[in-house]
Amino acid sequence: MNISPNISTTPKDGTKTPRKTRILDAAEELFSKRGFHGVTLRQIASMAGVDVALASYHFGRKRALFDAVLLRRAEIVNTVRNEALDKCLDNAGKNGPSIEDIIAAYLRPLGDIQASGDSGWQNYLALIAWVNNSPEWGDELMTQYFNPLVLRFIDALKQALPDADEQAIYWGYHYLSGALTLTFAETGRIDQLSGGKAKASNIKAAYAHMIPFMAAGIRGICASKL
Amino acid sequence: MNISPNISTTPKDGTKTPRKTRILDAAEELFSKRGFHGVTLRQIASMAGVDVALASYHFGRKRALFDAVLLRRAEIVNTVRNEALDKCLDNAGKNGPSIEDIIAAYLRPLGDIQASGDSGWQNYLALIAWVNNSPEWGDELMTQYFNPLVLRFIDALKQALPDADEQAIYWGYHYLSGALTLTFAETGRIDQLSGGKAKASNIKAAYAHMIPFMAAGIRGICASKL
DNA sequence: GTCTATACGGCGATAGAC
DNA sequence: GTCTATCGCCGTATAGAC
């Protein structure tokens, strides 16, 4: 599936794309690297090659531009991931899908997006990582943009682990979420720490390890009485 | 062990603590909530009840103040965690400690700090979460302040899993790190998502689940051929 | 040494003229 | 749809009071 309908995926010919889109692209890139407060409208405008005031004209306040950046790709991500979850549930036998299948359905679309090499999408995912870890807006924005999908995912886990303590499942999701978003953030820390033996740029490896790790972890806390 | 020698742990009598300390406390709190760029020196000075210029007098540039905040508690955390790792290795039988023991030694001191209820320490941990997820400085600063401890921890894991693929261990650490720092961040997201069934304020639950989760996860990716 | 008052150049977001 | 103007706050430097 094409992950970027209606979205300029940072084409070479920058001048042909609408200025409004160029502003969103620039904002996405800068916000993803330095967060909301670390970026100025002038920097965004400069990177987009437009006048400062054009951003305000199109989007209003700085915060509204930030929201517009988040919103632009949210629907697409949610569609792709919901489809993956549908397929996972449909293809399962009468006992339902395995934990691995559910987690793979949740993660793999993101891995595909990240591995596509589209820098716009990579910036978007890094921005989500920033949002998720923000004490200021993490709760509000993640709830606003991704709650239905997350709740479906957690529900599938509950069905696959009918005897599990509910609280354990929420904590398991929380850990998965933290690990996932640190992977999005691409700080370079794992490269440094491992002396190059593990690389953040090796997206396939990141997800290939993440799926069995999280499945085993969730099984672990749901099996053990705490 | 006392986790806060020489450090004012946000006492009631705010006026008695040295102004330099009050500046650090205020900076710690504000940086932890809004990040480096989201805070101004004037806000910090105002919260500390001092003149703006005093921060510059004591610390120089804004970035130097930020570093001073990080440095202040880093040595203490590292000491406590190194001791926990020492004890874990000493107490182990000739086969060495289990994965669970190693992870518990790595995590439990942080759980104790967080559960102590000291708001200064809680702000500090939230700030570390911010740093860890920062594409701008995450790699540089985490390496600078915590690398020796992290390398010891990873080494202990390698010894406990002699047949494991090295890359898998680094990825396992990476996931643990992401989960841990999202827990520090206390965004309130897990409360919201679970409808109150799991609470970020329940630190004991967070760590009680985290230890078996991570142990099972690391076992999982080290056992399976990928 | 510790601290305050003040000032400066620069850039922030935004509104209003064009 | 575009640009200029404005006002306030930014980080920082400094002169001097205690």
Image (cartoon, coloured by chain):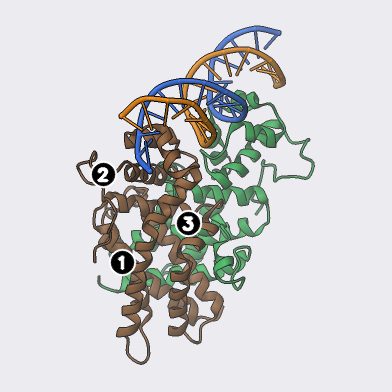
Chain colours: A green, B brown, C blue, D orange
Which residue matches tag 3? Answer: B132
Q: Earlier in the sequence, mark 3 or mark 2?
A: 2
Q: Residue at x 61, y 67 (%)?
A: A199
Q: CA distance from mark 3 to mark 2?
A: 30 Å
Which residue matches tag 2? Answer: B17
- Type of the residue with mark 3: Asn
Q: Nearer the viewer, mark 1 or mark 2?
A: 2
The reply to whether dot 1 and dot 3 touch (C-beta < 8 Å) is: no
Looking at the picture, how far across and down is residue A207, in whole percent?
55, 66
Dot 1 crowding, Cα within 10 Å, few <14, some 14–19, many 20+: many
Dot 2 crowding, Cα within 10 Å, few <14, some 14–19, many 20+: some
- Type of the residue with mark 1: Pro
Please identify the quarter of the rendering in which residue B215 is found. Answer: bottom left
> Can you name the residue that lies furthest to the left here?
B12
**SS at mark 3 in the image:** helix
Residue B69 placement, left or right of B224: left
Q: Quadrant of the N terminus of chain B?
A: bottom left
Residue A20 placement, left or right of A37: right
**SS at mark 1 in the image:** helix
Which residue matches tag 1? Answer: B109
Q: Residue at x 44, y 68 (%)?
A: A214
Looking at the picture, how far across and down is residue A145, in whole percent?
47, 43
Relative depth, front residue between B46 and A121: B46
Relative depth, front residue between A191 and A88: A191
> Can you name the residue that lies furthest to the bottom here?
B94
- Type of the residue with mark 2: Thr
Q: Earlier in the sequence, mark 1 or mark 2?
A: 2
D11 shown above or below A134: above
